[in-house]
Image (cartoon, helix red, strand yellow):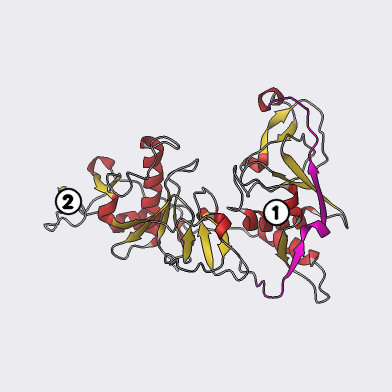
Amino acid sequence: MKINVNNWKLIQLKELFIIRPTKSYKNMSKEELDDGGQTPFVVNSAVNNGIGGYSSLDPTEDGGIITFSDTTNGDTFFYQRNNFIGFSHVQGMYPTTREWNEHELIFLVSLLNFHNRGRYNYGRKMTRENILNTSLLMPVTVNGEIDFNYMSNFIKRLRYKEIITKNKKQENINSVENWKEFYLHKLFKISMGNGIDAIATTNDNPKYNYVSRDSSGNGVVGFVDEVEGQKPFPAGAMSLALGGSFLGSCFIQKEPFYTAQNVGILQEKEPLSIHTKLFISTLIRNECKIKYQAFGRELNSHFRKDFTIKLPVLMNDNDYVFDKNKKYSNEGYIPDWKYMENYMKSLPYGDRIDED
């Protein structure tokens, strides 16, 4: 669903909320709180709605607010529906001018995560003051007031729009015994990304996606202005996280983009469908889980040299088809691009993948 933001207005969050630390049980660790009770406790996490477990202790905070961590990344904003237990460094956002409903707050959470993703990390902390002084583009009425009805109705439409697929039967993987290893550099043009620090980006007149070492949102952590002296990578290129907690995260980028530090780029040497690239990106992620390790054996010195993946190859009945020019492998094996494409198309919802 596309959104036209041309008539939206910048609103500073300090006009709408106060932010304070959530109440917690002092000196209790996550392990001590997590005793299998019924009360969720919210910790410094970007996953599982920030919930670290469940406790038998009483809630310290009422539900119906937004929480975020001031000590991790910029994408830890969550709507907490139920009463919960707070935690050290978990901040709560409390409305000051009116009571917001659930749909309005979920809409705002999306804006907050999109705006702040990639701006903050363990070194550059996301403080209460930073967030209070943040201005977000928000929908407004003809009178210039925040259009809460638009926000609420937008989320309601998302909740009740069923995603359908015509795919009923998934194609089976043929025997992987006949798959062969290929060096990544034989299949793609490989390079380092731009290596632009988040602090060096602005978004006054944003033009390009900003891709970092993230495992969600296709790796896109921001939408930034053109950076002088930096050439964006084209739509269709693949980004690869070379290190950090999300090492191996590999995505096809559908818009031109810049990258943060420690991101590799894979550009096809010949036209490949998005389905084929999705097949390959999945294998890359799996290979990284097996052979590489964050903060240890990372990808930097390997992805352009000796990184390999196994792929299905062209066969003529039971015989391999060989390429005498050895374009793809030193042995002359040829990747079966069409098989990869058809397999991805056959998956549930594979027919919903847009080629454009």
- Quadrant of the rendered image containing residue 110: bottom right
Secondary element at image label 1: helix
Nearest to the observer: residue 221 or residue 313: 221
- Quadrant of the rendered image containing residue 115: bottom right
Return the residue at label 2: 317
Nearest to the observer: residue 82 or residue 208: 208
- Percent of width and height locating residue 10: 73, 67
Total marks placed: 2
Mark nearest the camera among 1 and 2 is: 1
Res 160 seen here: no
Return the residue at label 1: 109
- Percent of width and height locating residue 147: 79, 67
What stretch of residues is rendered in magenta? 4-29
* Residue at x 72%, y 58% (from the top left corner): 134
How busy is the neighbourhood of tag 2: few (under 14 within 10 Å), some, or many (20 plus)? few
- Percent of width and height locating residue 353: 47, 61
